[in-house]
């Protein structure tokens, strides 16, 4: 090769090298971002007017060998107040922030959201099924923030190993991207393109961005050690294990864990539940949140999902678990296995396949749970189909089938759902939902379904108002009207309902929500736990919520509700009221306290067989705590919850075969409940996804006969000490 030719090639290579050399320092250097896609057309999506944003915003998108680099330049003049509140990871406070949403496959099934506040706080989420968000996932990505008199800037670098991706063609890959900026003081969101997660189509409306097909490999090992001291049992426990993450290329990922420590450093909210329906609790355990989007198969039923990871580890410690994610052509796949030890330990397995087409995608998932101690095998097959025939229509269908083999018995059944959304002009939208779950459909060995034996229909009309006068307190209003009908598979009407609601965004950044439900007479086939049905009269409920973000040193939240129900129907009125205030001692340190008082005049609680007690319930929930973001790596959180419940019996009832109430002479006793949860959690981030936790937790639960009054119960709850533990956990992520 001649010297002139060599010099020429070097001259061509230098600009490319400059393009890829992006330093994530919060300063948008034009030289570093040469060749990037430059975005300036940010338009209002909250309120959803499509008008240009009120403040100039620019963004740059650049593919580099290290990952997808994104930069924001946010003009913020002195006349617009800036929110300088420091926030903890996965914050939801109303502060100045930017969002970068990436659908790496561009098929609208799984996306990743990356949020950075003006003070450097971060949040990340997984998005599935167009607009379902899960904030439990934590990813490893880089960010930096810069600020000056004219505004503030953000730079992000999202590694290619964040998610499994299909191969691409001709050395290129097409992503879908959504960029947004939120002005904290007003709540205004401006975005490119003008998509909205309040619509049924969100990820499908992202902008296509074609980038070079970079590949990135990663091997990460995260060992941990933990120590626990139980002050009640006077015992100590030490544990150790490791998580492994391996991505040899963009089309394959493996996540494994050996002897995992799934002790909760994140405290679940307290719940007192006397209903026949199980409480749904999200999963924050790292192994189960990593690359979990592929396994999402949900229905319109509240929180329903075929694979509910909180089941794993509920009957025994987990010895090992494995997860594989990858792609073959236009198909994505996932494989999941986990094993519990102990006499009643179970094995869990799931196989997932999804194929993308131009305007639709089709998926299937097979799950299986085996338990030798009870000779029980559960197999569930789910099929999901998402179809976007036009820009106005979005149609989603699900089919579920379960088979339970236990000893010599076999039980199997089916379920199916379909929901369709139709976008009209001038902010109007319609929605139709139909659900059928068979009597013997059972997915709860590995999944979550609040109830089977369901036939449900609803039609909903929505209208969004955005072009409101400048004198209006509101920037937007969203009205909804819904009629629904629900029957079980025996032909019994559970209820018909008319619902009207209004969601309002105020110009000062506050939020309002109001709702009224009018319910017909119907019956409950769950209250008696399989011992018959209960006929219930017509009833109604109303609900109002108001949230005002931080103004000065204070933020406020208010809840109000009224309702009727029980066997009294509309003859007796119940009510609830709650208020929480947060005081900011500084931008980094805040304290909060709040309470919720509830009065239920006719509360039905199952006792045994077909015996039900009618109680007058008084309940008070108290919450308080503090959040201190010491610096970028140190966080301290204190969280306290206490519940006091006083239930005084008014009536005792049994029910005839048709569900009509009969006065009973059986003794039903007053009872009370007190519950406490208290946690002090310190977290130190040694390195990305490497943490030292020091956690002190105390709590307890007690239910006893007799009543004491809510005030005494609440005071007594602070003396509960069923559990008192000190946990120290250290984990460190090594990357190769």
Image (spheres, helix red, strand yellow):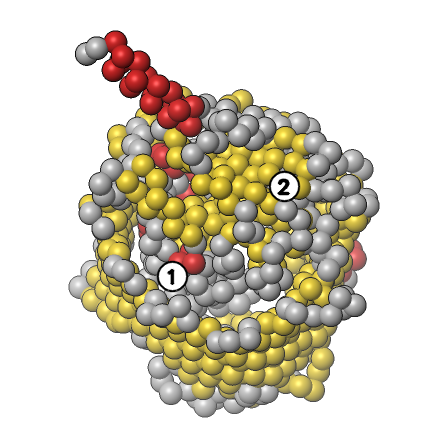
**CA gap, disc 1 to disc 2?**
37 Å
Up/down of 248 relative to 582, above or below? above
Quarter of the figure with residue 97: top right
Mark seen at residue 298: 1
Residue 575's spot in the image, x, y percent?
72, 72
Up/down of 480 relative to 242, above or below? below
Residue 629's spot in the image, x, y percent?
67, 32
Residue 701's spot in the image, x, y percent?
61, 51
Q: Residue furthest front?
A: 4
- What is the quadrant of the N terminus in the image? top left
Residue located 34% across and 40% down the image: 211
Closest to the observer: 551 or 639?
Answer: 551
Q: Is residue 667 left or right of residue 736?
A: right
The residue beneath circle 2 is 74
Residue 412's spot in the image, x, y percent?
24, 69
Q: Residues within 10 Å of mark 1 (few under 14, many from 20)?
A: many
């Amino acid at each position: 090769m001649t010297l002139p030719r060599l010099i020429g090639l070097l001259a061509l290579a230098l600009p490319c090298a400059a393009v890829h050399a992006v330093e994530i320092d919060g300063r948008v250097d034009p030289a570093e971002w040469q060749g990037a896609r430059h975005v300036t057309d940010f338009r209002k999506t909250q309120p959803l007017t499509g008008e240009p944003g009120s403040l100039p915003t620019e963004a740059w998108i650049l593919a580099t060998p290290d990952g997808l680099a994104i930069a924001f330049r946010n003009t913020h003049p002195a006349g617009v107040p800036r929110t300088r509140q420091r926030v903890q990871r996965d914050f939801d406070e109303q502060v100045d922030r930017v969002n970068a949403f990436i659908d790496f496959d561009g098929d609208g099934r799984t996306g990743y959201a990356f949020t950075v506040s003006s003070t450097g706080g971060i949040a990340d989420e997984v998005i599935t099924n167009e607009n379902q968000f899960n904030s439990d996932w934590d990813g490893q990505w880089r960010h930096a923030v810069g600020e000056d008199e004219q505004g503030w800037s953000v730079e992000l670098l999202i590694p290619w190993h964040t998610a499994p991706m299909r191969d691409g063609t001709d050395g290129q890959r097409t992503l879908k991207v959504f960029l947004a900026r939120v002005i904290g003081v007003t709540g205004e969101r401006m975005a490119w393109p003008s998509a909205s997660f309040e619509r049924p189509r969100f990820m499908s409306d992202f902008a296509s961005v074609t980038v070079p097909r970079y590949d990135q490999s990663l091997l990460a090992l995260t060992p941990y050690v933990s120590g626990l001291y139980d002050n009640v049992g006077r015992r100590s426990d030490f544990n150790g294990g490791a998580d492994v993450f391996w991505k040899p290329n963009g089309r394959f990922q493996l996540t494994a864990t050996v002897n995992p420590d799934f002790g909760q450093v994140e405290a679940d909210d307290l719940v007192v539940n006397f209903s026949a329906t199980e409480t749904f609790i999200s999963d924050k355990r790292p192994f189960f949140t990593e690359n979990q989007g592929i396994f999402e198969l949900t229905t319109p039923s509240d929180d329903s999902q075929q694979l509910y990871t909180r089941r794993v580890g509920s009957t025994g410690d987990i010895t090992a678990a494995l997860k594989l994610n990858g792609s073959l052509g236009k198909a994505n796949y996932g494989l999941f296995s986990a094993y519990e030890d102990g006499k009643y330990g179970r094995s869990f397995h799931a196989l997932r396949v999804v194929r993308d087409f131009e305007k639709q995608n089709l998926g299937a998932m097979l799950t299986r749970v085996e338990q030798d101690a009870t000779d029980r095998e559960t197999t569930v097959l789910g099929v999901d189909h998402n179809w976007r025939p036009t820009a106005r229509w979005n149609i989603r269908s699900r089919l579920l089938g379960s088979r339970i083999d236990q000893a010599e018995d076999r039980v199997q059944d089916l379920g199916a759902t379909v929901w369709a959304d139709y976008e009209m002009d001038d902010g109007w939208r319609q929605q139709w939902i139909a659900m059928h779950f068979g009597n013997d459909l059972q997915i709860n060995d590995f999944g979550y379904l609040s109830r089977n034996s369901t036939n449900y229909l609803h039609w909903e009309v929505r209208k969004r108002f955005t072009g409101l006068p400048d004198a209006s307190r509101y920037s937007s209003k969203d009205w909804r009207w819904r009629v629904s009908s629900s029957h079980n598979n025996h032909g019994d009407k559970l209820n018909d309902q008319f619902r009207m609601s209004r969601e309002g965004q105020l110009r000062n950044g506050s939020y309002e929500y109001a709702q009224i439900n009018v319910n017909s007479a119907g019956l409950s086939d769950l209250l008696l736990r399989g011992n018959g049905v209960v006929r219930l009269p017509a009833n109604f409920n109303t609900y109002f919520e108001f949230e005002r973000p931080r103004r000065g040193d204070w933020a406020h939240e208010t809840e109000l509700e009224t309702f009727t129900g029980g066997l009294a129907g509309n003859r007796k009125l119940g009510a609830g009221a709650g208020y929480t205030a947060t005081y900011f001692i500084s931008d980094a340190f805040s304290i909060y306290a709040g309470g919720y008082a509830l009065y239920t005049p006719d509360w039905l609680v199952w006792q045994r067989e077909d015996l039900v007690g009618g109680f007058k319930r008084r309940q008070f929930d108290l919450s308080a705590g503090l959040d201190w973001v010491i610096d970028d790596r140190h966080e301290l959180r204190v969280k306290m919850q206490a519940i006091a419940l006083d239930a005084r019996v008014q009536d005792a009832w049994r029910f005839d075969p048709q569900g009509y109430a009969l006065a009973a002479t059986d003794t039903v006793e007053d009872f009370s409940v007190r519950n406490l949860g208290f946690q002090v959690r310190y977290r130190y981030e040694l390195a990305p996804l490497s943490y030292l936790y020091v956690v002190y937790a105390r709590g307890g639960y007690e239910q006893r006969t007799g009543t004491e009054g809510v005030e005494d119960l609440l005071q007594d709850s602070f003396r509960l000490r069923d559990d008192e533990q000190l946990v120290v956990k250290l984990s460190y992520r090594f990357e190769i």
